[in-house]
Image (cartoon, grey):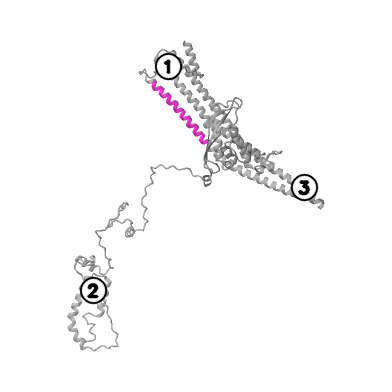
Amino acid sequence: MEDPWADSAPSSQPLGSSQQSADDDATTGLPSTTTSTAATTSGTGSSAAGPSAAPSSSSSTRPSRITPRRIVAQPTRLEAVEDDPLGPLGAPTPAAASDAASVSDGPPVPPLKEPSSHTLPLRTTMPPAPGRKQRAGPPDPHRIDDDEDDEEGGGLRRARPPPPVQPALPSPVQTTTHPSVSVEQAARPSFHITVGDPCKVGDLTSSHIVYSVRTKTTSKAYKQPEFEVRRRYRDFLWLYNTLHANNPGVVVPPPPEKQAVGRFESNFVESRRAALEKMLNKIAAHPTLQLDADLKLFLESEAFNVDIKHKERKEPNLGESKSVLGSLGFGVSGGNKFVEHDDWFHDRRVYLDALENQLKTLYKAMESMVAQRKAMAEAAADFSASLHALSTVELSPTLSGPLDALSELQLTIRDVYERQAQQDILTFGIIIDEYIRLIGSVKQAFQQRQKAFHSWHAAESELAKRKAAQDKLLRQGRSQQDRLNQVNAEVMDAERKVHQARLLFEDMGRLMRAELDRFEREKVEDFKSGVETFLESAVEAQKELIEKWETFLMQLDAEDDETVFYRPPVVQTNKPAGNTAVDRARATIHEDSD
């Protein structure tokens, strides 16, 4: 009869030792070859000890079924196979087996992945650090092993320095950027106004200069984006006075002053044209004045005189009834002397007086310098005439040629002096004159504020009188109820006027503060631009003179070449004689030679 306990065959090794060996194998993680070898040896030992153990088991007493059955966990056995596709998990070399036996007591070693031949190398532009050992395999672009290297070195873990960053090189592409402006300025309409083509019209008694005013604008209030009208000087003066009346407290750019003598000279006409053009462009750039209806009438009306007369008939008190100032008696000047109580306005008034005096002094010095340049131009013309006379008398061509060339050079110098004198007036002199007139416009704004102050106090005096009459009627009782109702209405109207006059005076104060700040900003910009243009023109004039003199000296150095100063004979024509100093001198020389 077969033993029912045969499924757990006894072995020569105790149960505890077998389980211990399995635990050791699982703990040490030995290779599969070692486990399989031990298993083979254990199997051989078991088979050999089987016959001897059988009699003892048969002769022993049968175990009781009450005793629990012990289940033994069998270890997993791995066998080495040739051509193992598992790579490093296959059969090891003898050296590896000996190393595994020597480190059986150490921690388990993780398997290494075999580098594939199809792995693409990772490229990186970062150079390896000096003194750093290279890692086997493909390069590590993310520098993951740096932490391990720091830990192996035994030092503290240091932060990796950032990679070097190359400085940005300037772009070869030139980009044009416009200066940044505020949203409010960008939303405003733009104006570009030119004043040109001055021409004299009329007979001897009513002759005057008419200018062409061309306007380019983005404003939707005008019929067309580009248009042109003809205006004379008095039209510009009308615009200035009208804008002053319509906008109390605003500094309106003024037109140039009148001139009774020499008003048709070319230099004066050109300087007036430039001043009128600058006046219109500043008015159109002002945030308040560019919205005025009279500016639109001036720039766009084809029948300007007819439109003005129609406007005057429609509004008889033009300039006084368009604002609160007309109802407050603004046109009436105050009888009392104005005393400024605001220190800020007092300091600005003192500053403007001093600035006006300094600018007038500077303008006189500028006129003196321009007069000296014109005198030098006349002196150069006289010198040229004398040199030409000497060259006609001299018989030697080696001397008459240089003298005549020097005479022509002096004429060039005369032209340069005259042109520089005119440029000084148009570049720097016109700015000085403009700001002298602008200070006068600022003073007119101060006078408007003073009149508003007098109107306010006059309204307060009128209110005090109305209240006194009201109190008198109240003391008399109800016998004059109708009169009392009338006086009450007058008192309420007087209080309203006082309130409006006070608000107007305060608003004009705030407006004038902003206007004076604008005046200071524009003054700095205009004078800086004017001085730069003045210096550039002076430098260009000096460069031109130096070039002329150097050319003349090079001609003098070429003494061997007799054709340097040779000039072909001039064919006489029936050209009328000029009236310049040179022409008169040459005419006198020809008469003496005859």
Span colored in magenta: 527-555
User: Real-space Cα distance between discs 3 and 2?
Assistant: 126 Å
Residue 56 forms part of the magenta stretch:
no
The label number, if any, that marks residue 77 in the structure image: 2
Kindly indicate whether the residue at mark 1 contacts the one at mark 2 (C-beta within 8 angstroms): no
Residue 85 found in image quarter: bottom left
Q: In this view, does 560 lie above or below 287?
A: above
Q: Where is residue 224 in the image (x, y as percent from the top left)?
A: 53, 41
Say what amino acid the circle numbered 3 marks. Answer: Ala
| Disc 3 residue crowd, few under 14, some 14–19, many 20+, Cα 10 Å | some
Given residues 245 and 438, the one toward you in this image is 245
Residue type indicated by callout 2: Arg
Q: Position of residue 463 (x, y in %)?
A: 73, 46
Left/right placement of residue 559 relative to residue 507 reads left
The label number, if any, that marks residue 571 in the structure image: 1
Residue 529: within the magenta? yes
Look at the image and tell me in which quarter the N terminus lies.
bottom left
Q: Which mark is residue 468?
A: 3
Give the image location of residue 197, x and y in percent.
52, 31
Would you place residue 158 above or below residue 41 in this image? above
Query: Which residue occupies 36% across, 58% down?
Result: 157
Residue at 49 percent of width and 20 percent of height: 381
Residue 418 makes an appearance in the image = yes
In the image, is 142 to the left or to the right of 441?
Answer: left
Residue in the image at 52% along x and 22% along y: 375
Task: Report the Cα–Cα distance between label 2 and label 1.
Answer: 130 Å
In front here: 581 or 295?
Answer: 295
